[in-house]
Image (tube, rainbow, N blue to C red):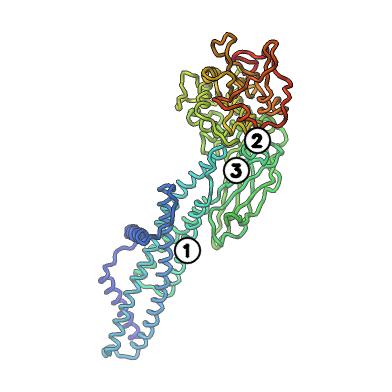
């Protein structure tokens, strides 16, 4: 018993001597400082060794920094893993040295020790010193890794993910389709892998403590705090990793998402950005529509998340959903919203069950408009206005007091409607025509000019139509009937009669152009050409009646242009359309689109032409 007490006293002496030698300071207060030193050292090492991730020249500086930090995090976690392995070996070796020393002490008297035993004691003490240093290093490296992981997660959740959601929101209303999830998924997955690895490393640390510990053991200082931090970071990452990859849309109207018609199938796709082997447990997802509504969903509303072949992540693709209306009831008169201004939420809920962890996840789609009747154009106008001005997915009462939009923002979205439906956006001249119409010419197309919801959407008592209806009718006609020559740039589109006359006045007789009708009810194409007066004086501009979808259902616009004729008294009918503005021969421009031989039947007499005006312009 005396010998054992002697050994314990020797060991305590070694511990105290090690403390004095190392001048140990409080570990918890030094973690952040140590973390930043390690980060700077490793960053310089990665740059000098040329191991930074290869990046495209156009990548934003923030993305470059995020890539660099994730690479450093992976390297740090790997080094900590190696250090823990070294620590395990060192602790095993120290245990093997310590136990024989106990036997030697028992066999010797307290006053007579050999030189060999003294050397053994010194070697054991040095080994304990090395063990203490390594234990301290492991904890500091773990603290550093969690500090860096927290920085990366903050950037992902507060910056990168919201930016992706905003890009998706703009893509839904015709904007650029820069919504690839590959890079975001890579960052989320790397961070999740590192956090899980850190949690496993902390478990190994706990096992080492159970085998051997001592007073002020670095492995016990702040470990519980690190455990809690690692778990909280991992849970928060997973909670934010569920996204709506494909917003609700009807397959027949793929370019008009977020508008759902009662009884028509629509689709939704969700995806988990975190890719981990332990997540392949096929969680079940339930999709539902907001409870405070008169609609409910039919079809496969419960689905199992499976591995998506393209991304390798868990995903659920709802392809056969339909919305039905509940039994009619007395609708509340509390809110004065019409059907096209009512917004509804579609939500997906699931639960991830991991070892020692269960996480409930929920994601809400962008608000949708449910159509029971009426035109899709009205609902699509609501979708445009909401997504231009609101990023809050739960603001269902947005249209009780919708804010105005600046012309600079609205003009970009209106141009997107044409570029997404065809291959050609609206140019500056067309947008200026629209600005003059909605803001007035005195505004001179001011991008800061404000357009109110009622001005954009509501039907005018004077004209019987709305600004948005006028644009949509021409968009729809362009997409369905004249997209080929629109893409060629042969239709000038939105052009005022004053601008039309100014363009043609200096051109050769027979020069013509194509523009949209200024009458919103028609939604048609007008052909205007220039001629000279009979005395050879001032140029005279003539315009046809508007060619609407009814006309274009029977004959294509290129054929109309080819076969168009007018008569002048006793002269034979002639085609006055010779050069497409500015100077392209008619058949050169449209010849490839002609579909039948010209028979010159159905020519228009001159008395049907009105100088500068028509029945529907």
Image coords of residue 378 (percent x, y): 62, 29
The C terminus, quarter of image: top right
Task: Write the residue at 29% across / 77% down.
Answer: 14
Residue under label 2, please give it. 370
Q: CA distance from mark 1 to mark 3?
A: 34 Å
Q: Residue 327 vs residue 113: left or right? A: right
Task: Write the residue at 54% across / 57% down.
Answer: 275
Tell me the SS state at disc 2.
Answer: strand
Q: Residue 20 vs residue 367: left or right? A: left
Q: CA distance from mark 2 to mark 1?
A: 46 Å
Q: Crowding at label 2, few (<14), some or many (≥20) Cα neighbours within 10 Å?
A: many
Task: Write the residue at 54% across / 33% down.
Answer: 425
Q: Nearer the viewer, residue 431 or 2?
A: 431
Residue under label 1, please give it. 197
Q: Nearer the viewer, mark 1 or mark 3?
A: 3
Above or below 316: residue 379: above
Q: Crowding at label 1, few (<14), some or many (≥20) Cα neighbours within 10 Å?
A: some
Image coords of residue 534 (percent x, y): 60, 10
Above or below 11: residue 155: above
Task: Write the residue at 58% across / 47% down.
Answer: 245
Q: Is residue 231 visible?
A: yes
Image coords of residue 53 (percent x, y): 43, 57
Give the mark, 2 or 1, whose residue is nearer the N terminus.
Answer: 1
Q: Which mark is residue 247?
A: 3
Q: Are marks 1 and 3 in contact (CB under 8 Å)?
A: no
Above or below 549: residue 28: below
Q: Quadrant of residue 614?
A: top right
């Amino acid at each position: 018993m005396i010998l054992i007490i002697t050994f314990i006293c020797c060991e305590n002496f070694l511990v105290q001597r090690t403390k004095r030698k190392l001048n140990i300071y409080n570990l918890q207060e030094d973690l952040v400082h140590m973390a930043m030193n390690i980060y700077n050292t490793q960053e310089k090492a990665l740059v000098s060794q040329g191991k930074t991730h290869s990046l495209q020249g156009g990548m934003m500086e923030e993305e470059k920094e995020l890539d660099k930090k994730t690479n450093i995090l992976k390297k740090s976690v790997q080094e900590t893993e190696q250090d823990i392995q070294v620590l395990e070996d060192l602790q095993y070796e120290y245990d093997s040295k310590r136990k024989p020393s106990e036997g030697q002490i028992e066999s010797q008297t307290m006053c007579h020790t050999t030189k060999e035993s003294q050397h053994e004691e010194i070697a054991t003490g040095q080994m304990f010193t090395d063990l203490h240093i390594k234990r301290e290093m492991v904890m500091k490296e773990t603290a550093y890794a969690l500090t860096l992981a927290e920085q990366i997660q903050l950037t992902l959740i507060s910056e990168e993910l919201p930016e992706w959601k905003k890009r998706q929101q703009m893509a839904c209303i015709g904007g650029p389709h820069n919504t690839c999830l590959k890079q975001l998924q890579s960052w989320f997955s790397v961070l999740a892998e590192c956090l899980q690895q850190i949690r496993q490393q902390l478990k190994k640390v706990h096992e080492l403590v159970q085998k051997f510990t001592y007073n002020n053991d670095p492995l016990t200082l702040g470990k519980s705090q690190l455990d809690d931090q690692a778990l909280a970071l991992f849970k928060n990452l997973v909670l934010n990793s569920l996204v709506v990859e494909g917003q609700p849309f009807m397959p027949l109207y793929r370019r008009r998402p977020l508008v759902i018609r009662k009884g028509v199938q629509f689709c939704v796709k969700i995806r988990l950005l975190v890719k981990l082997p332990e997540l392949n447990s096929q969680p079940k997802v339930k999709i539902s529509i907001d409870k405070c509504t008169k609609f409910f969903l039919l079809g496969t509303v419960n689905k199992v998340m499976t591995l998506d072949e393209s991304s390798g992540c868990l995903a659920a693709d709802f392809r056969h959903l339909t919305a039905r209306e509940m039994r009619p009831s007395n609708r509340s008169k509390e809110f004065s919203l019409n059907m096209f201004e009512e917004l509804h939420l579609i939500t997906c809920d699931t639960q991830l069950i991991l070892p020692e962890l269960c996480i409930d996840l929920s994601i809400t789609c962008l608000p949708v408009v449910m159509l029971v009747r009426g035109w899709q154009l009205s609902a699509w106008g609501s979708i445009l206005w909401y997504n231009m001005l609101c990023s809050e997915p739960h603001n269902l009462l947005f249209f009780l007091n919708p804010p105005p939009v600046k012309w600079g923002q609205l003009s970009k979205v209106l141009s997107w409607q044409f570029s997404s439906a065809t291959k050609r956006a609206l140019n500056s001249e067309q947008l200026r025509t629209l600005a003059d119409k909605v803001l007035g010419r005195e505004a001179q197309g001011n991008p800061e000019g404000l357009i109110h919801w009622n001005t954009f959407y509501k039907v005018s008592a004077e004209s019987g139509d709305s600004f948005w209806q006028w644009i949509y009718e021409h968009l729809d006609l362009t997409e369905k009937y004249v997209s080929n020559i629109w893409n060629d740039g042969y239709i000038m589109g939105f052009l005022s009669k004053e601008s039309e006359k100014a363009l043609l006045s200096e051109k050769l007789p027979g020069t013509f152009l194509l523009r949209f009708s200024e009458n919103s009810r028609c939604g048609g194409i007008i052909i205007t050409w220039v001629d000279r007066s009979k005395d050879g004086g001032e140029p005279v501009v003539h315009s046809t009646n508007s060619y609407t979808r009814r006309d274009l259902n029977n004959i294509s616009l290129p054929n109309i242009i080819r076969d168009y004729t007018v008569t002048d008294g006793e002269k034979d009918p002639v085609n006055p359309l010779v050069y497409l503005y500015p100077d392209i021969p008619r058949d050169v421009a449209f010849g490839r689109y002609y579909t039948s031989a010209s028979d010159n039947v159905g020519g228009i007499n001159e008395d049907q032409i009105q100088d500068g005006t028509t029945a529907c312009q």
